[in-house]
Image: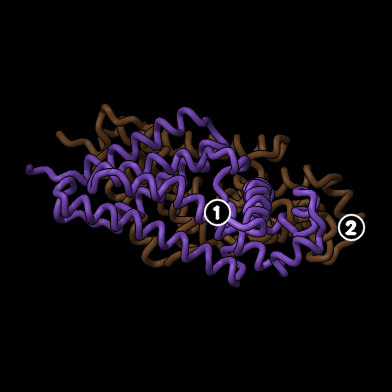
Chain colours: A purple, B brown
Amino acid sequence: MTKGDETRSAVLGSAIALASTLGLEGVTIGKLAEHVGMSKSGLFAHFSSKENLQVAILEEAIARFVALVVSPALKKPRGEPRFRALFDRWFEWSRADFLPGGCIFVMASVELDDRPGLARDRLVASQRDWVDTLAHAARIAVEEKHFRNDLDCAQLAHETFSIAYGYHFLRRIVDPAETERRSRAAFERLIADARATNH
Amino acid sequence: MTKGDETRSAVLGSAIALASTLGLEGVTIGKLAEHVGMSKSGLFAHFSSKENLQVAILEEAIARFVALVVSPALKKPRGEPRFRALFDRWFEWSRADFLPGGCIFVMASVELDDRPGLARDRLVASQRDWVDTLAHAARIAVEEKHFRNDLDCAQLAHETFSIAYGYHFLRRIVDPAETERRSRAAFERLIADARATNH
């Protein structure tokens, strides 16, 4: 990592934390400069526009999501263990220290859904990739005969995604412990339904 | 309705539409005044502070949610038909003309989750009420023997809520038609599991 890369990564770490609380729109180059103790012109040299900054924040968040959730899960055995690990590690993501305001993708989805542009395109691609990753892990679990042959893997991915979104919301506005217990129970019901019944 | 009430209701209608797109924080008294063609001082006389305006927006949104979703569903026969109607009408809410940016409660949850105050309190109370309404409708369906005796009604409410949140997100960032189909399929699976098996 060069010095420039290190600076960029540290700045984006602060930007992710800010965006998690204030939203991507709240992270202006001016506010970020104040937060990291750099000059506005220095940051402007790195990111050149608010849209580029938003795309860079999303790229960094995606890289961290892959490192924290996807990569460790892909090291688990193929099939149900890997699918479960993807769900389990998602809870870690939602509670990560660097996301003090909760999941940045939830925040960005609410902000960007009606704002066409590069940032929205990147966000949409990342969310599609994530649903596809879940569906692909489910398909492997079918191949491994952990899940039944006639399972609709895209439907399982959709429902898993919905459970996680429900968790993100309800934990922050109702009760975190009860929400986690109920979200895990919902997932167990999904898995029980997905399992091969005749083996 | 007095003239003052009518003005207030019209102003809050515009405010809900703005908040659905920009967020509650985006609806300043200045911006709202510009939007409805009233003076800032006139609006200030109505709402007196940004926090009061946010609470008033939430109250109006809650009243509309009750009118569009809850009240019509409560006119349906007790039991599964009523529970289904609560879920069905939720789709109408999510697509309501007066919510051009999608569900205002989703937007407000993301904004207010880490901002203690009267607006957050009102939002949290409304979301708890809504989960309770779902759980209560499920309990009636157990009494009516449409759903099984050992059903965990709070769990069913939690899962229904999660399906709806997943729908709100995925329809706006992935594909609306496929998302609706999958969210309805998830709900049918929930209902099948909730039904009494021995009658």
Q: Is residue A123 left or right of residue A139?
A: right
Q: Chain of mark 2?
A: B
**What residue sits 49% from the left and 56% below the top?**
B169
Q: Which mark, by number, is residue A61? A: 1
Look at mark 2 in the image and give the residue it sits on.
B40
Q: Chain of mark 1?
A: A
**What residue sits 29% from the left and 34% below the top?**
B144
Closer to viewer: mark 2 or mark 1: 1
Q: Is residue B114 visible?
A: yes
* SS for callout 1: helix
Q: Is residue A24 left or right of residue B128?
A: right
Between residue B20 and residue A190, name the one nearer to us: A190
Position of the N terminus of chain A by quadrant:
bottom right
Q: Is residue B3 visible?
A: no
**What residue sits 73% from the left and 46% below the top?**
B54
Splitting the image into 4 quarters, where does residue B28 fall? bottom right
Place of residue A93 in the rendered image (x, y in percent of width and height, measured from the top left) = 49, 43
Q: Is residue A61 left or right of residue A50?
A: left
* SS for callout 2: helix
Between residue B187 and residue A53, name the one nearer to us: A53
